[in-house]
Amino acid sequence: MKTPLPGILARLFTTFLLLACHTGSALAQNDISPEALSRLPVDSWPTNGGDTFNRRFSPLNSITPDNVANLKGVWRVHLESGTEPRHSGEAAPIVHDGIAYIITGDDDVFAIDILSGEKLWEYRANLSFLISTVCCGWTSRGVGLGDGKIFVGQLDGKLKALDANTGEVVWETQAEQWEAGYTITAAPLYYDGLVITGFSGAEKGIRGRIKAFDAQTGELAWTFYTVPGPGEFGHDTWPQDNTVWMDGGASVWQTPAVDPELGMLYFSTGNAGPDFNGSVRAGDNLFTASILALDAHTGEYRWHFQEVHHDIWDYDAPNPVILFDITLQGVERKALSQAGKTGWIYILDRITGEPLIGIEEKPVPQEPRMQTAATQPYPIGDPFVPHSIRIPPEGFTLENQGGIFMPYWTSPVVISPGLAGGSNWAPSAHDPRTGYTYVCGSDKPYIFQAAEISTERPAPGDDYTGGVFRGSVLPGLGVLAAVDMHTNKLVWQQHFTDQCWSGITLTASGLLFVGRNDGRLTALDSSNGSKLWEFQTGAGMNAPVSIFEHEGTQYVIAYSAGNSLMGSTHGDSVWLFSLEGTIDEASASEASGLSGTANNSINVAAGIPDIDAGKEIYLSACTACHGNDGRGGHGGGMDLVNASDYDMVVTVVSQGRNNMPALGPVFTPEQLRDLAAYVSQSIAQP
């Protein structure tokens, strides 16, 4: 049907008005000063953490525990991006001057008008389907904003600046090469004329680093290597008789924090490489599994604290660092905290890096073949997840009750917490009034097993883990906890029936917003964790929300898109909520991924499978959970070594089993045929 000319003109005029209303204000982003970005956000959400302290705390209080039950949708926008099995939606929306900016797992970026829900512009990254060095699902955790630009870190290793008014590319730089294992999943940080980003890829034999670029031109300003080289402080914590340090890991998974008064930048790092075999890297292996402070303008080292010496458990630190001020023993202290995969919160003085509550070095069990560290840091206070297993899982005997820092060698050992947490990437939040930090974590043991490995360098982009791990031995539970930063003691704690994988945002009225894998966005009472409101978004609610006020109304904005590691239903929705909203929640069938198609149906094509096509599908959709070689990935998928029965693979992929979701509706019949053939003929061992 043809659209009448007046209708076309009306739409063009509306779009012109929307863009005109925002042109001047977008350019006013030049006025975002370091001091302004460190204040609690009110009429915007200008950084990934809400402010450069990463507190994820909104001082707004119009939405309260008494009226939150009236919260409804104002609008819902479908982005039509990032919906494939490989994608995850983990991005916190950035909001500035009435415009929301959101990025999908395909690195596509959208600008949306807050009042109308109109898409003002969109940027398509057009990433190659063949990018094969992404660790844990295709994802981005957000964009950066400043200097009239939107900054985008991409999975192909490019950093781009988009015009905030139009979405046009202003500059781009190949910050690192994805073929060498480097990808960007964290939201870049704009700070005082610089764009700062870290790089993922420790499982691919990278040497970790964080870089700063000139926001105007994209020129490199400084680089800090998180694995120090010869002559640099910390290099002596790596072997001197091999070059393992060149592939030593220490990814930077999250957006850093900045204290403008001190001029210091803070972030934490990932595991050492190879992940699960310490035999070739004797020493503490700085700066892996550490918290680091740098000069924000020059990248010069200031201090570090290592959470795990000589890590062999993938106990990296992907949770964003939080800055806050707190009174301890009558003295106002500048503090920093980081919630680790170990299940502890590490509380430090952000000026010196010294522990504020106390952290004790304690002896731990040893495995000489792993070159294990003699002691590990134990923070004084309470862990927010269990550090042992009460009952052995079937087929295993527990050593040291499966407790934290239990070593292993080439026989499988079950250990808690596993590498999914403690606390993984999903951000924590801090209440500056009470001194409580709220953590979204997981109680999930994993099986660890080393493999023989040489000291030869891996080929660029190859897996470099030195062992295998599996997470299907016991079901994973979510943990939500409030911890008092005055004492590092639990205030309250509760279990979810599934892993907590979305992050937390907090308000001054006492509300704690957290998403769930089944599609619900929930609001909890921050004083005790009791649920006050829930809203079905239609897909896995696996991203932290942002909260702001616009023209006198308080809003909550959420990206609902699902997650490849959690097996949650995929989608493409951005929801805006307020007390004046009128849109009801999505249907239960949409949230379960059914959408009129039975999950237990099997529809596989006949004919000769295309093994090469099956490999592409596997590398794109399956490696996050099962690994490139099928021995297990970060999603805790089963070992596929015995998956040689083609019909069985078709059935399990279609109908699901244990932690494996039913993916029958996701693949075409031809894709299912080709994928099952590749797994059964190429991944499985005869």
Image (tube, grey):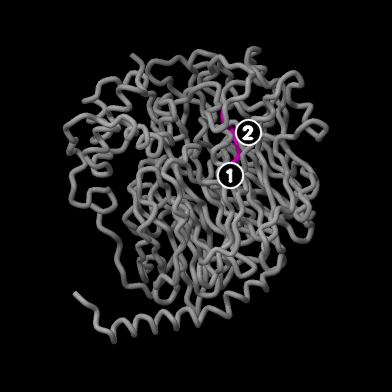
List x then y, in percent, for residue 415. Answer: 51, 24
Of the two numbered discs 1 and 2 in the rendering, the one whose residue sits closer to the viewer: 2
**CA distance separating discs 1 and 2:** 12 Å
* Principal secondary structure, stretch drawn in magenta: loop
Where is mark 2, residue-wise? 249
Where is mark 1, residue-wise? 253
SS for tag 1?
A: loop
Please rate how many residues cluster around mark 1, counting C-alpha atoms within 10 Å: few if below 14, some from 14 to 19, many from 20: many
List x then y, in percent, for residue 577. Answer: 40, 68
Please rate how many residues cluster around mark 2, counting C-alpha atoms within 10 Å: few if below 14, some from 14 to 19, many from 20: many
488 in relation to 417, above or below: below
Q: Which mark is residue 561?
A: none
Q: Amino acid at mark 1?
A: Trp
Which quadrant is home to the N terminus?
bottom left
> In the image, is 576 to the left or to the right of 490?
left
How many numbered marks have been drawn onto this rendered protein structure?
2
Q: What residue do we see at 30% from left, 62% from top?
A: 585
Residue 142 visible in the shown view: yes
Q: Which residues are magenta?
A: 313-319
Q: Amino acid at mark 2?
A: Gly
> In the image, is 103 to the left or to the right of 196?
left
Question: For residue 590: magenta?
Answer: no
Q: What residue do we see at 47% from left, 51% from top?
A: 90
List x then y, in percent, for residue 320. Answer: 60, 48
Q: What residue do we see at 49% from left, 23% from top?
A: 468
Q: Quadrant of residue 26?
A: bottom right
628 in relation to 147, above or below: above
- Residue 174 or 549: which is nearer the viewer? 174
